[in-house]
Amino acid sequence: MAKILMKGNEAIGAAAIKAGCKFFFGYPITPQNELPEYMARELGKAGGTFLQAESEVAAINMVYGAAGSGARVMTSSSSPGIALKQEGISYIAGAELPCVIVNIVRGGPGLGGIQPAQSDYYQSTRGGGNGDYKLVVYAPANLQEAVDLVMEAFDVADYYRNPVMVLGDGMIGQMMEPIEFREPKKRELPPKDWATTGTEGKRKPNIINSLRLDPAELEKLNQKIQAKYREIEKNEVRYEMYNIENAEIVFAAYGTTSRIVKNAIEMLKQEGINAGLIRPITLWPFPHKAFDEIPETAKAILTVEMSCGQMIDDVKIANNGRLPVGFYGRSGGMIPSPQEIVNKAKEMLGGAK
Amino acid sequence: MAVVFKRTEGLTETPFHYCPGCTHGIIHRLVGEVLEELGVLGKAVGVAPVGCSVLAYDYFNCDMHEAAHGRAPAVATGIKRVLPENVVFTYQGDGDLASIGTAEIVHAAHRSENITTIFVNNAIYGMTGGQMAPTTLVGQKATTSPYGRDPKHAGMPLKVSEMLATIPGASYVERVSVHNPANIRKAKKAIKKAFECQLSGKGFSIVEVLSTCPTNWGLTPTESLKWLEENMLPYYPLGNFRSPEEVE
């Protein structure tokens, strides 16, 4: 198929429809509005239903109902709206239901701003809502990757019966790039025999629920969910290693920031400094083992984020004290320039300030 | 020997956990009987709330969801949009529906979601230990209105049926009570009408059922029924507020 030029938010919507998403529940918030607007135009034509909810809270609870009834369902929002959805996300994770949640991140805290940011890393990877649960979190760095990951996200959600988040920053949502739709690798998806579709008098009632009043039963549920997470950690970690061989300094960056870092790597090369990049594609499960592959030549790791420093916690855990870990970040919708990143890298290597 | 009464197929054999004298049991039975009589148990999907009836998913003999506090109408919306041919209902108390879940119930009615809501109003939070609800009567003592509800401080009790009846999408709105056998029969009729409204695709239906809470009211079951009759009925008048005929 020929490549087509699409805006990020619309490409995500198109990929979801290609992946068989039939229901979308959302609420307007900038900078992701083109996504629900696209679904309002196109999902009906594909035999699905778009519904604008009265709130983010209602939207995610509609997702809970639809997912429990066996549908492929998605919602999208941006940071403060995702904060509102946390109640429902926790219930969905607790009831072990599949769904896809898109967060087109904007700067915070509070109402923050509407420009791109990566300040929802904690919110996405540490649970966000109450209880011991995790989302699979994909962080695309370009629109082709966004489209591929959205299509795969539905299969991953169904396979593990767990919510999957696609975390793009405002840049991913708003920019245009050429894309094509490619089938993800086939997975044997289990039948949704747990869905509430009516007993038809032929089976015992199905119950979608996260409540366990007996502590022993609740612990059992947690152990079951944790075992599933260990499987996900084993099977679903994804990352890119870039120019890592003989690197004197290794950057850690994801999403849009990783592209700016690649520019900085080129600039450093011109100055005779060899720099590499570890780019997590799954923020959870985090690619810990990538950091074991850092060569002996490396003197330091520099984490670059559009936040005040969140992924750096995972980088430090993965590094396990081996190398000094530095940080450079801009926040609030400000974007780090390649030169700023170059300067910080040289400072860490003890070169020119 | 002739069978004069038997458990409805609409309920499972799980014993209710409700306090002695609580009328949730009666209301559960009415809903179960109606689902059975309409022959829709096999395609029913219910949504339980957070509150005393949180375990309703163990009692109704059909597919069930357990929703977050107040969100049952949103969950039911998601289910009904996926399964328009199924019969979808929520069962909610007054803390759940009239307080934390007002946005969800108002907008389910506003969209005229083709679902049925059973709203149990006993003027108090039961499960959490007798706190004041939006529906607690003026002067009524609760653990968070220990000197009695003061309308200057906490507002007047919320009349949910009257409020929802102002919404164009609310197709069927009726308030009933279960304080005596005659009213229990009327309540069942109203619940049946509400489900029939859904079955004929006429949109959102709700039955508000006035109910008792002997434990948190500090009264015996018999005194509670009398208290409901003497105090709740004057403020929460029974009757039909909207019917599908009127909507057409």
Image (cartoon, coloured by chain):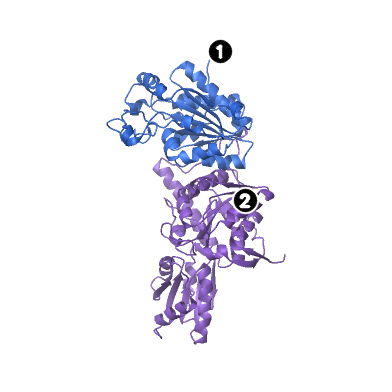
Chain colours: A purple, B blue
Q: How many numbered marks have been drawn onto this rendered protein structure?
A: 2
Q: Nearer the viewer, mark 2 or mark 1?
A: 2
Q: Which quarter shows the C terminus of chain B?
A: top right
Q: At 53% from the left edge and 50% from the top edge, which residue is drawn?
A: A27
* Residue in front for this viewpoint, A51 or B157: B157
Q: Residue furthest left?
A: B147
User: Measured from the top left, where is residue B4 in percent x and y?
Assistant: 53, 14
* Residue in front for this viewpoint, A4 or A234: A4
Question: Mark 2 belongs to which amino acid?
Answer: Ala
Q: Is residue A63 left or right of residue B129?
A: right
Would you say residue B71 is visible in this rendering? no
Question: Mark 1 belongs to which amino acid?
Answer: Ala
Q: Residues within 10 Å of mark 1 (few under 14, many from 20)?
A: few
A20 versus A214 height, above or below: below
Residues flagged by tags 2 and 1 on a common chain: no
A261 versus B164 height, above or below: below
Helix, strand or loop at mark 1: loop
- Which residue is disc 1 drawn over? B2
- Which residue is disc 2 drawn over? A40
What chain is tagged by disc 1? B
Q: At 59% from the left edge and 57% from the top edge, which residue is drawn?
A: A34
Q: Which quarter shows the N terminus of chain B?
A: top right
Helix, strand or loop at mark 2: helix
Q: At 54% from the left edge and 48% from the top edge, which residue is drawn?
A: A97
User: Measured from the top left, where is residue A56 in percent x and y?
Assistant: 50, 49
